[in-house]
Image (tube, helix red, strand yellow):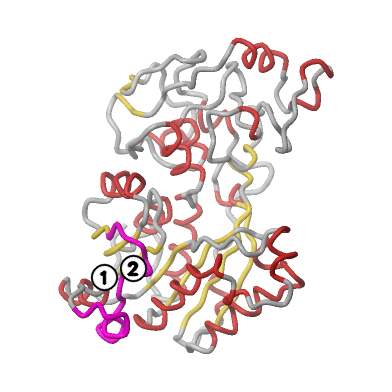
Amino acid sequence: MATKGITALDLFSGAGGFSLGMEMAGIEVAVAIEYDPKIAKTYKANHDKTVMINADIRTVPASTADAVFKNQESSTTIAEIFKNQGKSVDIIFGGPPCQGFSMAGNRIRKEKSFFDDERNLLFLEFLRMVQELNPKVFVIENVPGILNYNKGSIKKEIEERLAALGYDVASRVFSTEKFGVPQKRKRAIFIGNRLGLDSEQLFPEETHDEDSAVTVWDAIGDLPTLKSGEGVEITQYKSSTQNEYQKKMRSGNGKTFRNHIASTHSEKTISILKLVKPGENMKDLPSEFQTKSVHSGAYGRMEKDKPSYTLTTRINTPSVGRITHPVDDRTITPREAARIQSYPDHYHFIGDITTVGMQIGNSVPPLFAKALGDSIINKVFNQSID
């Protein structure tokens, strides 16, 4: 879908799930910033029209004044990149990493301000970009705990900082299976605007309920079955699509797809997985098969007829959660994980299983990002959604 020149900046872009969803909504992502070179490589391979800045965001000046302040007058600024393309920074979105509100962090933090905690300095970088570039709208994605941690004190700090910049700010927790993503993934979203609108009205409406939710098998049932260690980099489809979700995932792709390679597990691991029924995990096994694991749902097998639980970044390690294939005795492949995150099959993830797992597991599901983008286009920019 084409829109009338709505352009955006993606901060902490990762592999590009947030960008992809915004693009699906019709928003042009002109610039993205990602620190990790391996992850930036995947982003660039899938977003060739976006200027990728592979750097520490703390070294990237937003404006000329910002560059002078940082003693980086020779650096090209974000504002200049947009200006040179004849574009404006209409939207800034991203998920700044912040670790200072874990349970351990609570004991360390005590009464320290969220923004004084060095583990949350990257959140300040998001605020810096908003302050310097003055977008019409911003969207922040984060873990749900950020809203209720320490009786809501962090939520209040964030909203007060952004309100001081002239934005009406609202926040809410969403679960992505309510938007057609085959995964029960809860995320906190902050939306702000400086156009005099009530940001509470800018959130998207849910499109799916328990009866219409997309299931794991809806998502991956057409992909070739594999045993531990099987699979090749370029795989041919062996069956036709069985539902609209699979058609959506294959759209724009040819007869082959990538990233469908099963991890190799030890015989001991496979013997444990064979005992785990759909919906069960290690806790349901006889005591002699149970091992120590700090992860709830360790060795958990997915259920065909339900959305999955939140994916982890270590999709090749069954002891970290419910990432075992619903039928095969192995963990899910990167492509199956990508389907569960709602990435289409033409999206190519580059790197070894460790970095690819991080890329997929840390992503904002594109279909959820599209819902956010659709709502913003409709309610802020007054453009109809096809």
Q: Quadrant of the N terminus?
A: bottom left
- The residue positioned 68% from the left and 41% from the top of the image is 211
Q: Residue 232's image quarter?
A: top left
State the extent of the magenta-drawn residues as a range. 53-73
What amino acid type is highlighted by mark number 2? Ala
Q: Nearer the viewer, residue 326 or 275?
A: 275
* Percent x, y of residue 137: 43, 76
Quarter of the picture holding the C terminus: bottom left
**Which residue is drawn at the image coordinates 42% and 22% (left, top)?**
261
Residue 242 point in image, percent of width and height: 48, 26
Residue 200 shows up from this direction? no
The answer to whether 37 is drawn above or below residue 84 in the figure is above
- Helix, strand, or loop for circle 1? loop
**Residue occupying image coordinates x 51% and y 13%:** 227
> In the figure, is residue 263 to the left or right of 69?
right
Task: Look at the picture and state if 262 lies above or below 88.
Answer: above
Residue on which the image places disc 2 = 8
Q: Is residue 145 left or right of residue 364?
A: right
